[in-house]
Image (tube, grey):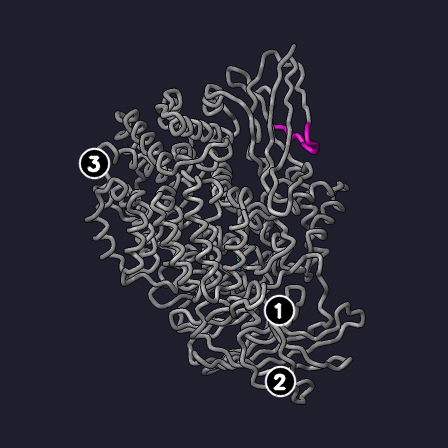
Amino acid sequence: MKDAAPTTAPETFYLKNYKPFGFEVDSVELTFLLSPNATRVLSKIQFSPKSDAVDPRFFLHGEALKLISAKINGEAVTPEMVDGGLTCATPDTPFTWEAEIEIDPAANTALEGLYMSSGMYCTQCEAEGFRKITYYPDRPDVMSTFSVRIEGQESVLLSNGNPTGQGEGWAEWHDPWPKPAYLFALVAGDLLNHPDRFTTQSGRDVELNIWVRPGDEDKCAFGMEALKKSMTWDEQVYGREYDLDIFNIVAVDDFNMGAMENKGLNIFNSSCVLASPETSTDANFERIEAIIAHEYFHNWTGNRITCRDWFQLCLKEGLTVYRDAQFTADMRSEPVKRIEDVIALRARQFPEDNGPLAHPPRPEQFQEINNFYTATVYEKGAEVIGMLKRLVGDDSYYKALDLYFDRHDGQACTIEDWLQVFEDATGRDLSQFKLWYSQAGTPRVKVTEDYTDGNYTLTFEQSTPPTPEQPDKSPRVIPMAVGLLSANGDEVCATQVIELTKAKQVVTFEGLTSKPVPSILREFSAPVILQRETTNAERTFLLAHDTDPFNRWEAGNALATETRVAMVTHGAAPDAAYLDALEKLVRDDNLDPALRALVLSPPSQSEIAQTLHDRGITPDPQKIYDAAETFTQTLAQQLETSLPRLYAATTVDGPYKPDAKGSGLRALNGRILSLLTRLDGGDQAARQYQAADNMTQQYGALACLMKAEKGATQSQAFFEHWQSDRLVMDKWFALQVACATPQTAANVASGLTNHPLFDMKNPNRFRAVMGALAGNHAGFHHDSGAGYTLLAQNLIALDALNPQTTARMCAAFQTWPRYDSVRQALIRAELERILASDGLSRDTNEMVSRILQG
Ligand code: B3K
Ligand code: ZN
């Protein structure tokens, strides 16, 4: 299924044009008569005209619907079909709207609205998918109760809320909590459940289920535990309790994103819920736990309190990401989670904020809202909340949150409502802080220092480069967490938060006996780029002594970056002092293995490219690749004598457990193995592959072997063993491309698109191959241009089937302004080719146009 090709310029929607809907929706009754190609949807909706309506027009959204009949108060009516929906004359008093429509779920490859995945019916309505199910005011500020009857042959028929009746071939559901249509869900399939129960803090007994296709029922236990932990955590930390008799989760193979928080019926991409030690890696387990928590937490932050309009998306997403990060930090390790989040922010959000797709966490315009489910809305949105919490303090934060829940339960809110509760709870004026929501771009904070007569002065200067449509930026409120260390490593000044509000600000620490070493932006207290002239000696000192684990890692990361930059720009050898420092750290058994693993993980090649670009140097992807290879080889040689002992010492004994301790050790063990493989030709990796009883170690060993071009036999064996497991096969597909050399990556990816198990209609499989290609920095940017061409070809083909996933993957091209003129021209040509293709979707059209304007 495909959105209609834009014949005229697509409409742009603006935040400033918001107008409330002119009618209340008092109740919604839906009946579904399921049939793969001709599902009938009968709706019966009670509308009441608002006396103070700003826009009294009765307009119902609808797309790709076949209207069979419509009635108002039982009388047949003939609505006027208009762009994007219908309109109709209506009574001045409350009335009943009824409609019968027909849709074709089996033909719906866009995976939005009601569609079929491996024989089961499922829905995805956020953001604007409900209009593909029936005519309705499909906007988040229209909230109503829903009653649903499903008629179908499938053994399991699910919808939102509580079950109210069921029999052979039918089931009925009622959701007593008013909700916007984007939270509607329906699932019908021959599914099996993994059941459990939970008693809430007030004693409500809740039935819990994870529903899966037969064969997957042994992969639900971990997800269920994660759900129960999330329910307990939200009660304990935020005082939020679950509010229905039942909570259902369904795993679906074909899904455009990770998961969806539909009220009482969360739908998950199977990759984000199914887990077993044999088929899932430690990283999979951590991600599944976080996504289950995220969707569950949406029940309060998103569902009970939703968004007034889609411009406010970060109101629910930023807050819920922040909450799930707190949860993961509590379940696992706070510093490790913070470091992982900053790595992800720099990898995904910084390129967005510093390129043609830059937009504020609350955008002011869009053509296709699905294009704004971005790292900026989610991750930067969460960073903004973290800053707010740091500025007001923990007690005030929870006081403001209580007020938010009390004041706005059952409402569709704005960022203004959100900030108002903080102003009311704390008495603070947040008008300058609010700029974080409206200004795009990553602020640069330049820091200089002076030490005179016991006084240590730090001068902070903030500025934000221009971004599309925003040439000038005002100074923001930046919480800057700073600590000071003495030359012998003692902390002479504990962490304090300096509030930067001006373009230039000076802070003096008095009474110091010697010049301290500053530890700035501790815990990454703001999403900014710190610019400070410093030495590798000071970085090495902080790597060894900083009391803030984040900044300890950050010092190592900066050293790694500087070393690579020097290698790339003037052919320097890897920095010897840094290698020594790394060696010391890796051998320090007192240090958390997870942190050691993170310090041993190099900055990504894409990040090095961005750093070079920021310093006015055009990055050469091949040189960056070569530097990474040389560095790792040199490190392996430096550690040669310690590696076998370290490998043995970090090998986890006993049965596999995906907890923080075990995962941390395995992460370090995996880093050691990859270094060892460079020296022993893959002997240890081959042994590990053979002996592994869990996917983390099996996949880790296979990756080492393939990277060393010694994994052909194991890769074949892996394929034969796992070929019927879809999620493991995604890993196999991705690994082929991720481990390919710069010269072969595009060829390998191209070959895989002809593999019998490649299926373009399955977003996971498409992403496994094309996402891995885009992630293979030197391969994607190989100067042949083959990577660009292959991705563009596949995006054009996918757009006809699934605009949402296509548009999202266009972001692989967003970094084009970084590169040389030859690469820029190659990318431009591919983007123009995409733009010129027949019937391009609104989604992809908007993304490519924005990228090209950069
Ligand atoms: N709210 C959904 C995302 C919907 C994406 C629509 N294109 C999942 C989440 O953030 O939890
Ligand atoms: Zn979310």
Q: CA distance from mark 1 to mark 2?
A: 18 Å
Q: Is residue 518 left or right of residue 478?
A: left
Residue 221 visible to the viewer: no
Q: Position of residue 144 (x, y in %)?
A: 65, 70
Q: Is residue 765 shown above or below 46?
A: above
According to the image, label 2 marks what residue?
Answer: 70
What number is the disc on residue 681?
3
Mark 3 neighbour density, 10 Å: few (under 14) some (14–19) many (20 or more): some
Q: Position of residue 759 (x, y in %)?
A: 34, 63
Mark 1 or 3, nearer chain start: 1
According to the image, label 1 marks what residue?
Answer: 138
Q: CA distance from mark 1 to mark 3?
A: 59 Å
Q: Is residue 105 shown above or below 572?
A: below
Q: Position of residue 127 (x, y in %)?
A: 57, 63
Q: Is residue 479 left or right of residue 756?
A: right
Q: Position of residue 402 (x, y in %)?
A: 69, 50
Mark 1 or 2, nearer chain start: 2
- In the image, which residues are magenta? 495-504
Residue 497 visible to the viewer: yes
Magenta span has 472? no
Mark 2 or 3, nearer chain start: 2
| Residue type (three-letter) at the residue carrying disc 2 | Ala
